[in-house]
Image (cartoon, grey):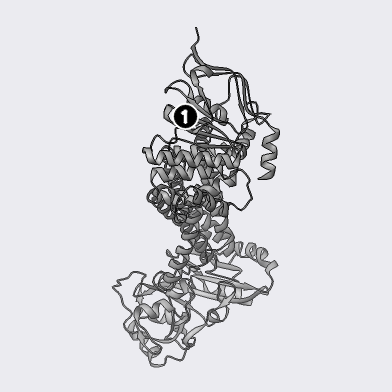
Amino acid sequence: MNSQQNRNSSVPVAIRLKDVQHRYPKSQVTLSIPNWEVQTGDKVFLHGPSGTGKTTLLNLLAGVLQPESGEIALLDQPFSSLPTRKRDKFRAKHIGVVFQQFNLVPHLSVLKNIRLAAYFADNKASVDSKAAAMIDALRLPSEVLHQSAGSLSVGQQQRVAIARALINEPEILLVDEPTSALDTDARDAFMNMLTALCETQNTTLIFVSHDKSLEKYLSSSVSLSALCTLKEAE
Amino acid sequence: MLLSFAVSSLKSRAKSVVLTFLSLLISISVLLSVEHVRMQAESSFSRTVSDVDLIVGAPSGQLNLMLYSIFRMGSPTNNISYESVEMLKGHSQVEWVIPISLGDSHHGFRVLGTSQDYFEHYKYGDKQRLTFASGQPFAGVFGAVIGADVAKKLGYHVGDKIVIAHGTGMVSFTNHDQSPFTITGILAATGTPVDKTVHVSLEGIEAMHLSPSKLKPIVANPDDTSNPLIQPDDVTAVMLGLKSKFATFTLQRELNNYQDDRLMAILPGVAMAELWKMMGTVENLLRIISVLVLVSSLFGLSTMLLASMQQREKEIAVLRILGAGGGTIFMLLLTEALLIAIAASVVSTSLLTVLFSVSKGWLASEYGLFMSANFFSVHNAIVIGAVLAATIVTTLLPAIDAYRKAIHSRL
């Protein structure tokens, strides 16, 4: 935990994008982000209507997509220029991701889902006790650890997804519309727990949503239309 | 981790996995049993006769001579004179001589006229001598020694009287009614054609072909084998044991060029190999069929994995986002396929071992097939190894597909 914080404090800029261009396959549309920086520990609310490149941006940040040109650097290290295998490893160790839904492998138990994340990140720490602590912090009964992920409610699954995404204490957490399947009460509880956990781990959070009412939980807010432009090539 | 993930993933698709497993189980079992029966047949075939250096008969073909003299199949074309037998008995290179005379039957079992030397020198399997389950070799004119199968099928015991018919058919029109034989001994089972043979003396064969009037004095005095009427004139073939194996080819050439009788000498091993080569065609056909059955189930396995890719897209997206590379997804599919194939191989081997252990006695008694129930041989290990290699090859297609999809999957 200490070394984690030291590392984070020595890296003030968690995310840096420079002249990033991405062309959508089978179309002439290009997404371009001239310049974007996120400080370590920031909790950025990224909002904008559907179809403005939210998911593409997340894919770029997670390293699933590679930009056509430009440079994405994470934690002051070049990221988008890494070979696929190294990007996969970097993602496993330094980036946590929570989707809208289907975050978990349904046929595995909750604990095994969490162990899987630790396995791919070569995280040899005592995963089980940490998972139990996180499940407790997320106000889930400890029995869920041994239930299959597919048998949980959507709200429970989303909370397990946070635990899974944070088990390796990643420096960056990417979250994509995680509350769209939740009702208002569950949504509030979810947001509080998410931000509290990020706070304790000093995690840089990128939170993507079209729901402006969630803005209040996060420290800063960026509109996608201000950040990037979509243009049709001639 | 990969392994436990694969197991869990297979469990979640239990129905299609079980069906694929069953189809592989059946085809691997077919392949293994065909291979097993083939190997066992070959060894049981070559254990029919042992330690006989030459078989001498009338010139025909070496296969023909071996088939009727050893396997009691087909009919002898011609006989050789008894003077030739005497010549062989006196030959300096010859250690022992077993004359055999065929052509008669008893309730469908072949009757073999021979001498006492048969029980002393005939060997099967790994140089095993014939042993008596009860009784002893025949003495006198009308003694008979029957094989284990004959005794079992016809319910005979030592001391029973039997009648021998002329010809080799099941139904014979000329029964040698006047020459009843008495069973003096029953041989222990050997798993060779000996079990299906009725052995009598050469004099007995001559006696039963005499007219009733001539037969009477012989029946009245059955212990006297010196009556000139029942001295054999000719025999069907002779089995020879030599003093030195090195003399085999010399003697063979000598006998083939023998001037006083038309003789042909063959080496049982060489004839056996030729016969087995002919059977090889059938054997290969069986092999091809079982390999095709296996290939079709492997395609089934591949299809199952390909079809599952659709429903597993999300699962793979999750793995990708956790940092699993395309290579990991590729290995995952390969592991799943190998798990099914290994399980099918293990179950198939155990199943066949149990099956053959249970039916061993029945196969031996009903069909004279002596099958070992041991499936844990090097040969079977090679067969299973080949099956697993083929599994990997047929899984490459879905695995590469999974790899590509994984690389291009989005959040």
Residue depicted at 36% across the width and 71% down the height: B167
Q: Is residue B266 visible?
A: no
Residue B309 or residue B411, whichever sits in front: B411
Label 1 is placed on what type of residue? Answer: Glu
The correct choice, above or below, for B366 with respect to B330 in the image is below
**In x, y percent, where is residue A203?**
59, 37
The correct choice, above or below, for A70 with respect to B390 in the image is above
Residue B143 or residue B348, whichever sits in front: B348
The quarter of the rendered structure image containing the N terminus of chain A is top right
Question: Number of numbered discs present?
Answer: 1
Label 1 Cα neighbours within 10 Å, binned few <14 / some 14-19 / many ≥20: some
**In x, y percent, where is residue B242?**
65, 72
Q: What residue would you read off at disc 1?
A: A215
Residue B397 or residue B148, whichever sits in front: B397
Q: Residue B124 lies in what quarter of the image? A: bottom right
Horizontal side, residue A35 vs residue A208: left or right: right
Horizontal side, residue B256 vs residue A155: left or right: right
Under circle 1, the secondary element is helix
Circle 1 marks a residue in which chain? A
